[in-house]
Image: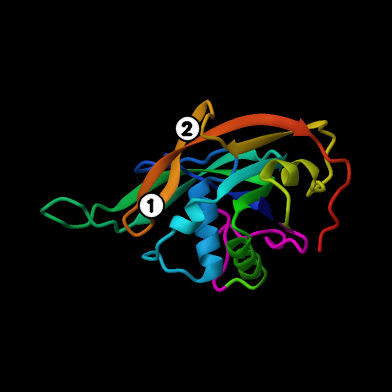
């Protein structure tokens, strides 16, 4: 098996999977739909393009630094009513959750040809990359020079790759795609254009923290 690793670090990130109406929630680590959306931006794929090849990659996330949950409020004005009568209803307030100062190592396991094309796209992205929302830009390059790990499984790559930041934690939380996982999330995109998603099973556990800190390049 082959695995591609890349980092998602920044002052603010938001990875919603259950947002409804005026409340925009976030998971505690990147969602699969959010990661695939980022990859589509890097590749230059439009919303209408198929994403089956990306959705079929097995994903894992190592949480090198747990983000601090935070919330803010947005006010949009001159919102048009959705009723048959139409008209303007004035202002609309939404509650938006996000993570502060989080650091994630994301791994994708699958065909090396596809992984290599993703590695090149992350190095020279076609569109601007963001961490869940357009306003949330990466604090460090997403691309990792040695991120393509040929001959390594997803577990091996996440277990051995140097930490993205300094940490005193002896163990790091890890979230893996697992058909026998105890939890499920509806965040596998079928179509971004139609906003259709399917479920995946995940397993949450802990691994020993790699002692060496990655030199930021």
For the point 62% across and 30% down, which residue is it?
204
Q: Is residue 8 visible?
A: no
Among the two numbered marks 1 and 2 on one chain, the one whose residue lies closer to the N terminus: 2
Say which mark, if any, is on residue 190: 1
- Name the one closer to the observer, 89 or 1: 1
Residue behind mark 2 = 184
Query: Which range of residues does the magenta coloring cover?
Result: 126-148
For the point 64% across and 43% down, which residue is it?
61
Q: CA distance from mark 1 to mark 2?
A: 16 Å
Q: Looking at the rendering, in which quadrant would you find the C terminus? A: bottom right
Reply above or below: 49 against 164. below
Name, please, the residue furthest toward the top.
182
Asked whether disc 1 touches disc 2, contact meaning CB atoms under 8 Å apart, the reply is no
Say which mark, if any, is on residue 33: none
- Name the one closer to the observer, 42 or 69: 42
Task: Kindly report the secondary structure that dominates the magenta region of the rendered protein.
Answer: loop
Reply above or below: 162 against 186. below
In the picture, measured across the screen, residue 207 lies left or right of residue 55, that is right
Please tell me whether residue 132 belongs to the stretch shown in magenta.
Answer: yes
Q: Is residue 200 visible?
A: yes
Please tell me whether residue 107 belongs to the stretch shown in magenta.
Answer: no
Q: Position of residue 52 (x, y in %)?
A: 44, 56
- Name the element at disc 1: strand
In the picture, measured across the screen, residue 28 lies left or right of residue 151, that is left
Q: Position of residue 102 (x, y in %)?
A: 68, 45
Mark 1 surroundings within 10 Å by alpha-carbon count, few (fewer than 14), some (14 through 19), many (20 or more): some
Name, please, the residue furthest toward the right.
212
Q: Position of residue 156 (x, y in %)?
A: 74, 43
């Amino acid at each position: 098996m082959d695995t591609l690793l890349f980092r998602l670090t920044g002052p603010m990130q938001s990875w919603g999977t259950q947002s409804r109406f005026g409340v925009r929630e976030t998971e505690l680590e990147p969602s699969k739909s959010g990661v695939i959306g980022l990859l589509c931006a890097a590749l230059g794929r439009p919303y209408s393009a198929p994403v089956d090849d990306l959705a079929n990659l097995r994903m894992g996330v190592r949480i090198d630094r747990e983000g601090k949950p935070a919330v803010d409020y947005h006010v949009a004005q001159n919102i048009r009513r959705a009723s048959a009568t139409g008209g303007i209803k004035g202002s609309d307030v939404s509650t938006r959750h996000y993570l502060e100062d989080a650091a994630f190592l994301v791994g994708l396991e699958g065909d090396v040809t596809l992984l290599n094309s993703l590695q090149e796209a992350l190095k020279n992205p076609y569109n601007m990359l963001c961490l869940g929302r357009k306003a949330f830009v990466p604090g460090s390059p997403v691309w990792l020079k040695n991120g393509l790990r040929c001959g390594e499984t997803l577990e091996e790559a996440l277990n051995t790759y140097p930490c993205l930041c300094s940490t005193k934690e002896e163990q790091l939380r890890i979230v893996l795609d697992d058909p026998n996982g105890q939890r499920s999330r509806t965040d596998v995109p079928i179509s971004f254009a139609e906003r259709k998603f399917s479920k995946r099973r995940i397993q949450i556990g802990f691994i020993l923290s790699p002692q060496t800190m990655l030199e930021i390049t």
